[in-house]
Amino acid sequence: MNFYDNINNLVSSFKQTDEYIEYKRLKESLKSNTEIYNMLKDFKDKQNEVQIAFLNGQDVTKEKKEEMENLYSIVIQNEDCRKILECEMKINIILADLQKSMGEAIEELVKF
């Protein structure tokens, strides 16, 4: 089996995880409620803006932090929104573990 076949198998395995399946189910379920879906989308868009600003070395204002905290407290009041955010955290842990494993695998290539 070649390397790219292994990558495709890894992707397939990832898509079969409980976390991935639950995330997809919740996302489809949320789409049926446009108001809640758009509220979560707006929150995630703003969250991404803050993360990009932070990664670019820009300061995040106190007002922006408070706005995000307020939005988060509103979003998590909805059970489906809370569950999808929890799924995202679990998926991020899986991806971080994968990244760690890949980093360890190539460590000897980048260290002198």
Image (cartoon, helix red, strand yellow):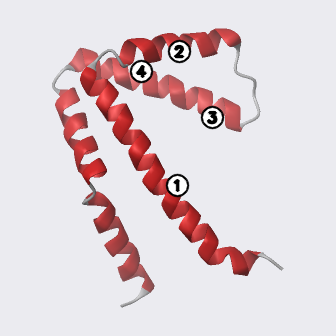
Q: Residue at x 47, y 55 (%)?
A: 95
Residue carrying label 1: 96
Mark 2 crowd level (few <14, some 14–19, many ≥20, 10 Å Cα): few
**Which label is found at residue 58?**
none
Cα separation, mark 2 vs mark 1, equals: 24 Å
Residue carrying label 2: 69
Q: Nearer the viewer, mark 1 or mark 3?
A: 1
In the picture provided, is 73 more to the left or to the right than 57? left
Q: Residue at x 21, y 28 (%)?
A: 31
Give residue 71's position: percent from left, percent from top.
46, 13
Going by the numbered disc 1, the residue's amino acid type is Ala
Q: Residue at x 36, y 19 (%)?
A: 76
In the picture provided, is 44 more to the left or to the right than 63? left
Going by the numbered disc 3, the residue's amino acid type is Ile
Q: Quadrant of residue 59?
A: top right
User: Which badge, 2 or 4, comes first in the chain's sequence?
Assistant: 4
Q: Secondary structure at mark 2?
A: helix
Q: Residue at x 29, y 67 (%)?
A: 12
Give residue 38's position: percent from left, percent from top.
32, 20
Mark 4 crowd level (few <14, some 14–19, many ≥20, 10 Å Cα): few
Q: Secondary structure at mark 4?
A: helix
User: Which badge, 3 or 4, comes first in the chain's sequence?
Assistant: 4
Residue carrying label 4: 42
Give residue 47's position: percent from left, percent from top.
52, 27
In the picture provided, is 101 more to the left or to the right than 30? right
Q: Secondary structure at mark 1?
A: helix
Q: Nearer the viewer, mark 2 or mark 4?
A: 2
Q: Is residue 76 above or below residue 23?
A: above
